[in-house]
Image (cartoon, rainbow, N blue to C red):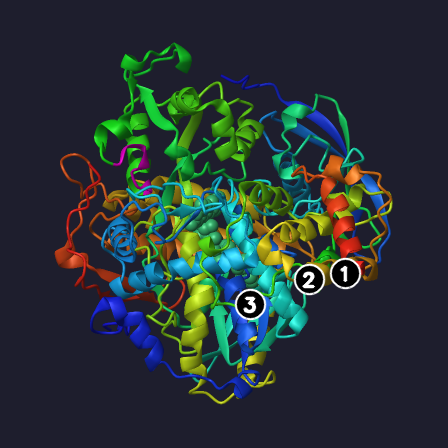
Amino acid sequence: MILDGKCPKGPIQTSWDRHRFDLKLVNPANKRKYKILVVGTGLAGGAAAASLGELGYNVEAFCYQDSARRAHSIAAQGGINAAKAYPNDGDSIYRLFYDTIKGGDFRAREADVWRLAQVSNNIIDQCVAQGVPFARDYAGYLDNRSFGGAQVSRTFYARGQTGQQLLLGAYSALSRQVKAGTVKLFARTEMLDLVVVDGEAKGITVRDLVTGEIRTHVGDAVVLATGGYVNVFYLSTNAMGCSVTANWRAHKKGAFFANPCYTQIHPTCIPQHGEHQSKLTLMSESLRNDGRCWVPKAKGDQRPPAQIPDEDRDYYLERKYPSFGNLAPRDIASRAAKEQCDDGRGVGPGGRGVYLDFADSIKRLSEGTIRERYGNLFEMYEKITDENAYKVPMRMYPAPHYSMGGLWVDYNCESNVPGLFVLGEANFSVHGANRLGASALMQGLADGYFVIPYTIANYLAKTKPGAVKADHPECKKSVEDIKANTQKLLSINGKKTVSEFHRELGKIMWENVGMARSEESLKDALKKIPVLREEFWKNVKVTGGPGELNQQLENAGRVADFLEFAELMTKDALHRNESCGGHFRVEHQMPDGEAKRDDENYCYVGAWEFKGVGKEPELHKEPLTFDNVHLAVRSYK
Amino acid sequence: MSAHNAQTMTLTLHVWRQAGPNEPGRLEQYEAKNVSPDQSFLEMLDEVNEELIKAGKDPIAFDHDCREGICGMCSQVINGVPHGGQERTTVCQLHMRTFKNGDSIYIEPWRAVAFPVQKDLIVDRSNLEKIMQAGGYTSAHTGGVADGNAILISKIAADYAMDAAECIGCGACVAACPNGSAMLYTSAKVAQLAALPQGQVEAAARVTAMADALTEAGFGNCSNHYECQAACPKGISVKFIARLNREFQKALFK
Ligand SMILES: Cc1cc2nc3c(=O)[nH]c(=O)nc-3n(C[C@H](O)[C@H](O)[C@H](O)COP(=O)(O)OP(=O)(O)OC[C@H]3O[C@@H](n4cnc5c(N)ncnc54)[C@H](O)[C@@H]3O)c2cc1C
């Protein structure tokens, strides 16, 4: 099937304004008759639930943590982009649009990206009005910093805790709606199934994580804002509870999964220290504003960094990409780091690390200035590594961080299942094959505050409120299926723990479907994943019972889904016989090692339809056209 | 380069186990073996749990998520101190290098009337939500707000607001307070918004509503012990409590 993103035609500059006028409206008196289920309370879901509640809809919001405020958006450090052009340095909506399309290696839809750039400015205003304490200069104006893949300073920030502050802004708006009675919150509640009635999304089946109760909530539309799936690699910068479960269960009920192979490996994370490690910690990209990446020029140079003189150092990003330098985009910076380490010039334990050095900036600006800019990051680095980065350079290595792929949605953020909308990191829409720094926060809030409030009305206006009741046979069936699945997990009583399976899966994925992928490595993974999955269902040990707070059971369900999803992700990577952005196929590179796209054959979104576990999924294509940006080789030299 | 200590430790853990909210709880003893100094406290507990699961026993339930000190999910009292007593550190950022081979460690849940235990180390903190819902916001509508630079905010005010806004809502302040008060938590939000022009319009109504909610939710009174500040993993200062009191006084005379 050829998919249609339903993008507005005509000049892109006015596309969103024209589209908004064409969308149907629900009149104010009718809004409260509609119930909307919002799964996820991160930037995307929190902003959506608050805004929809304020419009007068009847909203129920769900999250697996004990509070809406703890969604993993809270961990974002560096900042959020907007095309305000306050510094007068040449920025514009067009430039943010252009940078994002180019940064994504020409694998995103132009119309969606334009809208994102356009509403980016409203986001900053909205957050300021909520009381988000963005950094200010001494005159009281908003301050900016730079992020990768851009030559302008368009990133707004709140110390090293921008995600926290933006999320707390959304959470406070949400709290206000809870008090107003428009939003009902269900914390410690995990969505385990999508209820589809006559082809449309009308409910979700959840497990109460405290009592173990499994029940269905029905509504007139479902919004998924459940975040990313890079925990498929086991070790990543995501929170322990981040999973593909909500997305995957919706996929099994008919929603197409787009570009699952597009994953982002972030260049600056604290290197792994041992076998028992549970997660990897990101050090914000903003550090590359003032930190310089280098490795020794000579292989196996064991001297402490301070004793390696400048002429024996290779500032490899500055050397390879003089115009962007240390602020080269993430996919490129990650591959460059790996290249240095593969070449035997890595530093630290096992040679899997590069230096991120602040000595020059400290000399130029003073330690106090660096502390003011990144104090909390230096503190976190010291807690984890026991090293003082004001004195010795940080050691960094790339780590799985973000998923550009996600459920397929059209321009209205609606999936191919009518009534199912997908927002934030959970959808695939704007970042193409590589996301630029500070653009995920922007997307989450754009989708939640400024897109879904308009587009969901267009769907609701065509439906009768309350059409599906909780006793509908599809609801009962869904509850029975989930109960049976839970029982099955608990009854296996095998020998290996859930974490052991997750770790093994992660190893397969990191080695075969990680930063460098080849036909051979992908085919190898496609052999190993089903074997591991089969073993899981025979040999996993899940303790405890179904009707209680049972973290092993929660985790088992998530890992079971990763074991299915991993296969789709690998298949997508194998089918995409080109390199683009974060998807690097070693067979396809330029003579200098850069990613080599194949626009003739792969300039499309690959959206997969589920056909059964272990069965061949069906590929649907949405061709991408570029009318406003010239399809060109991406260069940061 | 840091001392990458290859030497591992053996520790004796005394962990609070409680099957459910209405079940009796008790301390149980476990041994943590082969603990690496580079491991985090939660990674140490992960390993203990792996052993328990393999032995067919119920693993220790504890809250955790981001494991980078910002989500506020982790909540353990370690050797009598919320988050373990290392300055400005959550449990997930506490590393085993701060312990010695042979140490005994006592691990308990947050203890406060307003935080009933749900299981083992997991407590119900939904009472904190009620305080936020009472008034922890500006009533800005989505859309239709002024340009971000139309409101100038001095760097001093912005920094002060940010100092308060760093609160992660973990509840350590409540757990540390002899009265089980959530005053530090509440004051941080009141002070953040009171310091900003956007928040001043509703300042009086906010402080009154939030203070009422604090009492209604069953938190104790503040009697200036300042244990909260010492336990706070983000270093939130008690000066915000003074600010709350001032805002409260102002509200009374309005
Ligand atoms: C360490 C780190 C630093 C980052 N720094 C930046 C940065 O500086 N700038 C930037 O732009 N981006 C950054 N990012 C990326 C950005 O933070 C995320 O992409 C973005 O916040 C995702 O928001 P979201 O709302 O889509 O999902 P999330 O914030 O992950 O929220 C997901 C929500 O869904 C809920 N949920 C998930 N599954 C279920 C289920 N099955 N049932 C019920 N609820 C469920 C969760 O409880 C949660 O409420 C960073 C990411 C990380 C990990």
Q: Nearer the viewer, residue A300 or A49?
A: A49
Residue A626: x and y in percent read 18, 61
**Residue that badge 3 annotates:** A50
**Residue that badge 2 annotates:** B135
Residue B208 is labelled as 1
What is the distance, in whole Å, between disc 3 and disc 2 at their CAs?
A: 15 Å
> Which chain is indicated by disc 1?
B
* Residue A214 to residue B222: above or below: below
Magenta part of the protein: which range? A324-330
The earlier-in-sequence mark between 2 and 1 is: 2
* Residue A185 to residue A583: above or below: below
What is the distance, in whole Å, between disc 1 and disc 3 at their CAs?
A: 23 Å
Q: Residues within 10 Å of mark 3 (few under 14, many from 20)?
A: many
Q: Are marks 1 and 3 in contact (CB under 8 Å)?
A: no
Kind of element beneath mark 3 = helix
Q: Is residue A258 visible?
A: no
